[in-house]
Amino acid sequence: MSNFGFNISNTRVISMDECNMGNVERLHLEVPSFKRCISCGACSATCSAHQFTDFNIRKLHNLYRRGQYAGLQEELKACMLCGKCTLVCPRGVNLRSMIINMRKILYEANKR
Amino acid sequence: MKKVAIIGAGPAGIEAASILANQQVEVLLFEKSLNTLSNMLDKAYLFPDFSPANDLVDKLNKKLLHQQITLFTGTEITDVKKDGKEWKVIDAKGMSYIVSAVLLTSGYSVFDAKRKEELGYGIYNGVITSIDLEKMIKYNQIENSMGDKPKRIVFLQCVGSRDEKSGNNYCSKICCVTAVKQAIEVKKLLPDTDVYIFYMDLRMWGQSFEEMYRESQEKYDVSYVRGRISEAASTFDKKIQIKAEDTLLGVPLKMTTDLLVLMVGMEASCGTKTLAETLHIKGEYGFAKSLNCHLQDNETTQQGLFIAGSCKRPMGINETLADARSASVIIMDYINAMQENDK
């Protein structure tokens, strides 16, 4: 087929009706404090990885809870599990455990 | 003569009437509608303690059974004039009453959601207001436009508030916590329903509001999305499709819902607007204006004319009651000083 130099852009819209929320429910069970996040961003502000790279745990948390898992598994590898985010969180979200469990859940989901 | 006219028999009017009456003041309480507390009659529960609204309505109405209080329902006050040291209050039928002081408690009305046409209220049956939902909760009849139990309910904050397009730049203040309260009530009645709240900011200003918000996330699985819904449309199966941006992700988002609940704000009631104009105490957005918001918040530029409650600005019920009590103290001072001068 001839290439005319045009292509169709994929939509960026998150369609909540088509999201698979199964992984979110699994995470709720493992880390109930996950639900309490109010996206203040204190975790990202204190995060050593965030100071030098694009790793943004506040944003990854938001993507996860909207069912946007693509690329998350790779991104989560940047976390060094130091746990400073857990120390600063005003809502008592166990972020360290959240990240470990996200990795676990996504690993199992992607293995299937 | 110790006689005070109170215009509006809502929570503020009744509370002030009862306190003044207990101080041996004769109170004439005027109400335009046929019922007292008409804005409260379809409320199910009150924030933040989830106490039944009916309890408060009954308790307030009971306070009116006082020999010093005369209640005039179905009586609209059309003019209020200074008459020497006294005040003359005139109703729609032309009857006039002479009193020493006047307290304006003419309250608020809710924003007419039809003015935000893009949100589809009055166009699609699945779009309702927080007032409609409160009734549904009260009578345990939460249904979508097809008469089914909704699988998803979406709340939208700031409808008619913080919105230049509606002509209201101010925050109505009570809608944030009302949505959290109603979301919890929906979850209590329909645990399997998905509940989303779209907000611009969540203003949990009152005692235990923040805890209620936290509980709604933790215990009731209410989801919050930061972003304002720009428009609503109907789908072929009579659901409502909404569009917004998840501003925390910077990505557009869409979803379909069985019910879209518009959290309508508070505006100055028609009576407040007219009387504030007539009495030359009109403030911003048609609300009545006090002398200053710190030490003279119940007084006006007119001596002997006082204001209390949501005719001044958006207020919750507990705040309105406290404001009515503070107005009563100021009015007592005013009447007593007047009598001293006459001696």
Image: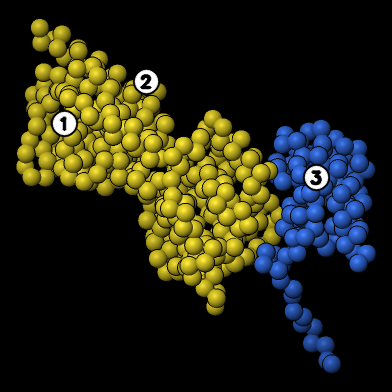
Query: Circle 2: is it few (<14), some (14-19), or many (20+) Cα within 10 Å?
Result: few
User: Is residue B279 positioned above or below A4 on the image?
Assistant: above
- Of residues B316 and B112, the one nearer the viewer is B316
Q: Which quadrant holds the C terminus of chain A? A: bottom right
Q: Chain of mark 3?
A: A
Q: Is residue B96 left or right of residue A97?
A: left
Query: Circle 3: is it few (<14), some (14-19), or many (20+) Cα within 10 Å?
Result: some
Chain letter tied to yellow: B
Outermost residue, bottom direction?
Answer: A1
Mark carried by residue B190: none
Is residue A43 visible in this depiction of the protein?
yes
User: Is residue B109 positioned above or below B212 on the image?
Assistant: below
Count of marks, rendered view: 3
Q: Residue at x 28, y 22 (%)?
A: B19
Picture quadrant of residue A40: top right
Give the residue pinned by disc 1.
Answer: B70
Q: Chain of mark 2?
A: B
Spatial CA span between label 3 and label 1: 60 Å
Query: Circle 1: is it few (<14), some (14-19), or many (20+) Cα within 10 Å?
Result: some
Q: Is residue B338 left or right of residue A100?
A: left
Give the residue pinned by disc 2.
Answer: B295
User: Is residue B102 positioned above or below B283 on the image?
Assistant: above
User: How is the rendered protein coloured?
Assistant: by chain
Type of amino acid at the residue the image marks with label 2:
Leu
- Chain A takes which shade in the image? blue
* Tag in front: 2 or 1: 1
Question: What secondary structure is found at the residue carrying circle 3?
Answer: loop
Q: Residue at x 53, y 48 (%)?
A: B185
User: Is residue B19 positioned above or below A67 on the image?
Assistant: above
Do the residues indicated by labels 3 and 1 lie within the same chain of the protein?
no
Type of amino acid at the residue the image marks with label 3:
Val
Give the residue pinned by disc 3.
Answer: A31
